[in-house]
Amino acid sequence: MIQVGSYLNVIDNCGAQEVCCIKVSKGYRRRYAFIGDVVTVSIKSIRRSKRSTARIKKGDIVKALVVRIKAITLRKNFNEYIRFPRNDVLLINKQNKLIGTRIFGGMPKFIRSTKFLRLTSLSAGILK
């Protein structure tokens, strides 16, 4: 469960390394975000190798798609649980397109059923 103040890792090659959630979108007084939700984040740190060429800078405010969360999530078929080792996001622009060009690691299968279908084709693999 991602809430305001949660630190998240970025798993694409846009240049950001760590971000902090400042707003959970989709609803009035909504407190938590789960896999597939969009949050507004602030860039906290940039990768060393990308500091000179990154499209974004420290302190920028962008939108992000939550891809993996640490909390146990019940699958759609109600007999499997999924859990990841850390909280990860992908940075997107205002048109809901990926800022980076690559995604590191796999993505959950049910991201395909959202409006972010193109992101699954860019990922390294798809998890059950």
Image (spheres, helix red, strand yellow):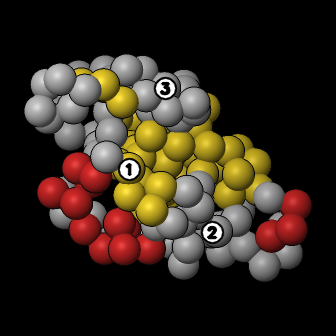
* Badge 3: residue crowd in 10 Å (few <14, some 14–19, many ≥20): some
Left or right: residue 86 compared with residue 128: right
Image coordinates of residue 99 in percent, x first then y, are 51, 72
Mark pair 1, 3: CA separation:
15 Å
Amino acid type of the residue that numbered disc 1 sits on in the rendered structure: Leu
What's the CA distance linking mark 1 and mark 2? 23 Å
Residue occupying image coordinates x 31% and y 46%: 128
| Amino acid beneath label 3 | Lys
Number of numbered callouts drawn: 3
Category of crowding for the residue at label 1, using alpha-carbon neighbours closer than 10 angstroms: few (below 14), some (14–19), many (at least 20): few
Residue 70 — which label?
Answer: 3
Q: Give residue 93's quadrant in the image.
A: bottom left
Residue topped by disc 1: 127
Please say if 89 is above or below 1: below
Pick whichever of labels 3 and 2 is earlier in the sequence: 2
Instruction: State yes or no: discs 1 and 3 in contact (Cβ < 8 Å).
Output: no
Q: Amino acid at mark 2?
A: Cys
Q: Nearer the viewer, mark 3 or mark 2?
A: 3
**Secondary structure state at the residue bearing disc 3:** loop
Q: Position of residue 21 (x, y in %)?
A: 50, 36
Q: In what element is the residue under mark 1?
A: strand
Residue 53 position within the rendered picture, expressed as x and y whole percent measured from the top left: 78, 79
Q: Residue at x 62, y 43 (%)?
A: 9
| Precedes in sequence: disc 1 or disc 3 | 3
Q: Which residue is mark 2?
A: 14
